Each structure stands twice: as structure tokens, then as C-alpha cells.
Amino acid sequence: MRAVRQSPVLQVEVARTPLPRRLLILTAVTAIAVVVGLILALFIVSPDADQGDVQRLFYIHMPSFFGAFVAFSAAVVGGIGYLRTRNVKWDTLALSGIEVGLAFSVVTLATGSIWARPIWNTWWTWDPRLTSAAIMALTYAAYLMLRGAIENPDQRRRFAAVYGIIAFVTVIYTLVIIRIRPDTIHPVVIGASPQNAEGTFEATVGTAVALVPNLIIWGVLLPWTLIWHRIRLQNLLERVARRRAERD
């Protein structure tokens, strides 16, 4: 198989744009935090009394959804910012947020499906919560298709901004659906009181030791670190495109 050669222009641009010190520190902290969070979830806390070790997926499944929520929220901010100012930096934020949020959504769906196989005896069921999460992911995947289908840059950014703002409805609906749909079998594991926390999950001593850190790691550190890296990559690609246009 013939190796794909990297563009000399891209190589030069990469060499000229080292990571900022703050991003370098944030990346290192996030990487260490992810490892610590996984150790807590997989090895430190006790398994669930009923589900056993498969319940440990919960410590990634739930935080990854909140990471997607944060990333998609950043996309809304970026979309509004672009519509107000027409500044490309806001469109870059929106694009980065949606790509990162979509990746987190895939993690949420994958871990949920793996959990469901031994607990529900199926990889997938058209439960309202699962269906809404799948629709959410597909909606944002369609955003990327929309961007690729529009050639005019200004029109592409404008349409993408509006789409990204409207698409956030699917995130809100996925977040609240287990509260408003009585026919869902998805467990409600967090409530205003123990009576409101229903479902097949039974918290054990030390649950918060793994859950709280992973919520912070997957819901704050990891999405913002990835968004920052994605913004830098997009800026680099745009500089390379301008260099090529000037050379041609």
C-alpha cells in the first residue's frame, strides 16, 4: 500500500505552531486525570450489589453524556457568536464543540449498549431514552454532512450556526426524557431524594469516589481540552488553505 505523503506546507505550519504552555499543562493534567478516573472506576470502588462489575461502565457512561452536553453547549455559544459578529473564530468553536460532542455521544451509546447486553439481555432496545440519544447523535452527524455539502464559506458557516443552535433541542430532550416519559425503562439513578432515584442501579459505599471525579474529568477537563486542540487544528488547516491559495 502506498504511503500518503503529508503536505510540505502543512509540515512547515505544524513546526511553527508549538502547543501553548497552558494547553500543554492542561493536556498533561487531563491525561493523568483520565487514567486516575479509570482506575477509580475499574479497580477501587466496590461493584454494584446486583449488577456486579458491568455496573462500572456507569462511571464512564453518565460522565461522557455530560461531556457531550458541555461540548454541544459550546457549539451553541459558537453559533450565536458567529451570527452576531460573523467572526470565523466563533464558527471554529461551534465546529470543534460538535465534533467533540459527537465523539462523546458515541462513547455514551457504546457503553450503554455494552451495559444493556448482560442486564437487559439485548444490545439495543427502542427505549425512549436510548432512541433520543441515538437521534441526538445522528442529528449532529448530519451537521457535519451539511457543512461538507455547502461550498460557499459564508453560507456554510451561517447555515451551520443555525443548525447547531436548533439541534441542541435534541440534547435537552435526551436529558429530561426519563423525567417526562413514564414508559422508559432507563434507570433514574439521580433524584432529589433516594425515592426519586429509581431503576436497577443501587449505589454502594464509595460510589461518589469514582462518580464525582469522572463527572469532572469527562464533563469539564476532557471536552475542553479536546475542543482547544480541535480549534488549533482548524486554525492550522485554514492557514494552510490560505497559503496554498496564495501560492496558486
Image: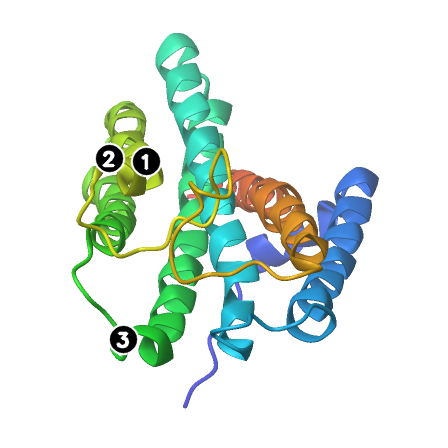
Image side of residue 114 versus residue 149, left or right: right
Dot 1 corresponds to which residue?
176
Identity of the amino acid at label 1?
Val
- What is the spatial separation of the Cα atoms under label 1 and label 2, in whole angstroms? 7 Å
Dot 3 corresponds to which residue?
123
How far across and how far down the image is residue 184, in percent? 22, 51
Identity of the amino acid at label 3?
Trp
Mark 3, other Cα within 10 Å: few <14 / some 14–19 / many ≥20: some
Identity of the amino acid at label 2?
Ile
How far across and how far down the image is residue 157, in percent? 32, 28
Image side of residue 5 versus residue 196, left or right: right
Q: Quadrant of residue 127?
A: bottom left
Image side of residue 29 versus residue 106, left or right: right
Dot 2 corresponds to which residue?
180
Q: Could you tell me which residue is drawn at 82 percent across and 46 percent down? A: 25
**SS state under label 2:** helix
Q: Could you tell me which residue is drawn at 35 percent across and 61 percent down? A: 109
